[in-house]
Image (cartoon, grey):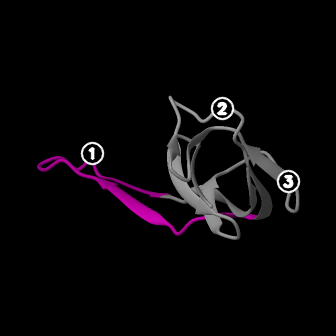
Amino acid sequence: MKAVIKTGGKQYCVEEGSIIYVEKLDAKEGEKVVFSEVLMLDKKVGTPTVKGATVEGVVVKHGKGSKIKIFKYKPNTTSTRKKQGHRQPYTKVEIKKIG
């Protein structure tokens, strides 16, 4: 059974047993998470969500993604060169039940 869920402003296509990386959630490791915004369940498309459908998962771990480098530059000036880095936090979730 496949489903499309929405969390953190993004959409994810999931199946039972799949592992997804989502925006950081306020849940501890090993805690159960329920996604109630199910946009599609098998071939049933919601308007905008499927009523009564939920996807349950378990938080595996929290972490930070790989570092990206940001460099802002304007020519002919030395004061507008800026180098910055960023690591996006994530939560690794294993999907247990779709219903």
Label drawn at residue 80: 1
Can you give x and y, in whole percent of width and height, for residue 54 in the image? 72, 44
Reading the image, the residue beneath label 3 is 32
Work out whether residue 47 or residue 28 is closer to the camera in this orientation and state it: 47
Tags 1 and 3 touching, CB below 8 Å:
no
Instruction: Say if the magenta span includes residue 71.
Output: yes
Can you give x and y, in whole percent of width and height, for residue 79 in the image? 27, 45
Can you give x and y, in whole percent of width and height, for residue 19 in the image? 65, 68
User: Nearer the viewer's eye, disc 3 or disc 2?
Assistant: 2
Q: CA distance from mark 1 to mark 3?
A: 47 Å
Can you give x and y, in whole percent of width and height, for residue 48 in the image? 51, 30
Of the numbered discs 1 and 3, the one sitting upstream in the chain is 3
Classify residue 23 as left or right of residue 73.
right
Mark 1 nearby-residue class (10 Å; few <14, some 14–19, many ≥20): few
Label drawn at residue 30: none
Q: CA distance from mark 1 to mark 2?
A: 51 Å
Determine the residue positioned at 23% across, 50% down: 78
> Label 2's element?
loop
* Start-end of magenta stretch: 61-85
Name the amino acid, label 1: Thr
